[in-house]
Amino acid sequence: MHFLRHIPFLKAVLLHSITAFGGPQGHLGMMYQTFVKRRRDVTEEELMEYNGFCQLLPGASSTQTLTLIGYKRGGLLLAVATLLIWITPACVLMGGLSYLLDYFDDQGKTIHWFRFMQPMAIGFIGFSAFRFMEISVTNTITRVIMVLATIGTFLAFKTPWVFPALILLAGIVTNFSDKRIPEQAGPRKPVRWGNLLIFLMIFAVAAYLSETASNRNWKNRRAFNLFENAYRFGSLVFGGGDVLIPLMYEQYVTRPETKHIQNQKKDVLRINRDHFLTASGVVRAIPGPVFSIGAFTGGMVMRDDGQVAHAVGIVIGAIAIFLPSALLVLFFFPVWQYLKKYAVIYRSLEGIHAAVVGIMAGSTCYLIMDTFWYPLWRAEPLAFADLGIVAFTVFLLQSRRVQPPWIVVGCLLMGGLL
């Protein structure tokens, strides 16, 4: 009976989940209208605090913010229910897309409607780099970090450790200065580090089982590999879906084609490049979190094992990619009240955010080269059209005159006219 009184709140969450377009920024504006202005579940100050805190964590920031609203209103149980209702519609749609692309592959058909979704997706990433640069790159050290991260990402895109290495080094570099955000004195409070140990234990166990499954060639090894990959993405991605997508591209598209993997003849998880870029465009046209692309990648990497495995892959991909976001926000929000007093956290984040901008910029350059270089070299007309779509997408987003869903619809219609 206690839970039933929260039904109106959960109905509001469901309505939000099927109408929230525009990515994290659009989601925040709709949360303000729904949960602050209309329902008064939280105050404006609380919403801003929750969002600011979630920006400091890896994972899906809008998902974490909404989860905190549920946690504040009804505790852990309502927070979990809020999370599930929020992510389910988008994950169902993206999982359905994996079946659609699989069907067209089996029928040998070409999906012309999705022809321009790939360059459009690259345009979204490029725009995000520009947008975050205005916010995060504000002084000399952050400019240097951004440039070096851009170059490092472009040159070492095929190296899996380049992204965490750049983020770690950037966080260290900005702590050499003591001029930013002075220490705030305050009494020490006990921190329940056991919560962090649970998060790290899942991370370690997933990595061990994934490696063991591959080395010993377990029958269901793909499921273990998928969980580890998705959980790692959800645990390490700063900057939301615009950073997640390039990391997934490297993992599922670029890495399987490297000489090291091919020489060892490893059975690694892989996705067709056109399919992945199509999905990275479609995910921006649907309501809900961009991280729901995890449901799509889960289905695609498991589809060769049969229909049941395909469905299981969708579920694993969705759960594993959102699980770290939920664990981190629910475990660390109480800790945040203590840690936010220390300048070292803020100084590190200054460098991390600049590195994230560089990663997005370098990823955009790499994706343009990887997707369009050879067609442009051969002077193929559609290659110039693709490059124009990238530039026009950035222009429309920068002008703010056209909302992202309409850009996606326009690209779908142009593809259908081919």
Image (spheres, rainbow, N blue to C red):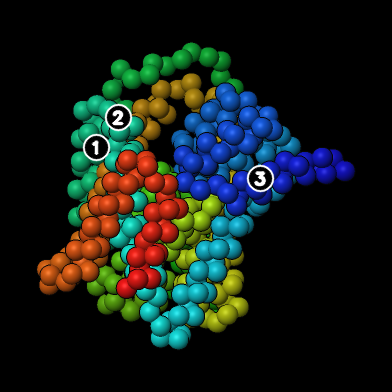
- Residue matched to label 3: 13
Q: Quadrant of the N terminus?
A: top right
- Residue matched to label 2: 174
Q: Is residue 165 left or right of residue 286?
A: left
Q: Are marks 2 and 3 in contact (CB under 8 Å)?
A: no
**Residue 352 visible in this rendered orientation of the protein:** no
In front of the other: 129 or 27: 27
Q: Earlier in the sequence, mark 3 or mark 1?
A: 3
Q: Is residue 94 left or right of residue 359?
A: right
Measure the C-alpha gap from mark 2 to mark 3: 39 Å
Which residue lies at the image location 63% right of the left edge and 29% below the top edge? 37
- Residue matched to label 1: 145
Q: Are marks 1 and 2 in contact (CB under 8 Å)?
A: yes
Q: Is residue 383 above or below residue 203?
A: below
Residue 342 drawn at (x, y percent): 45, 22
User: Which residue type carries mark 3?
Assistant: Val
In front of the other: 145 or 172: 145
In front of the other: 254 or 21: 21
Q: Earlier in the sequence, mark 1 or mark 2?
A: 1
Measure the C-alpha gap from mark 1 to mark 2: 9 Å
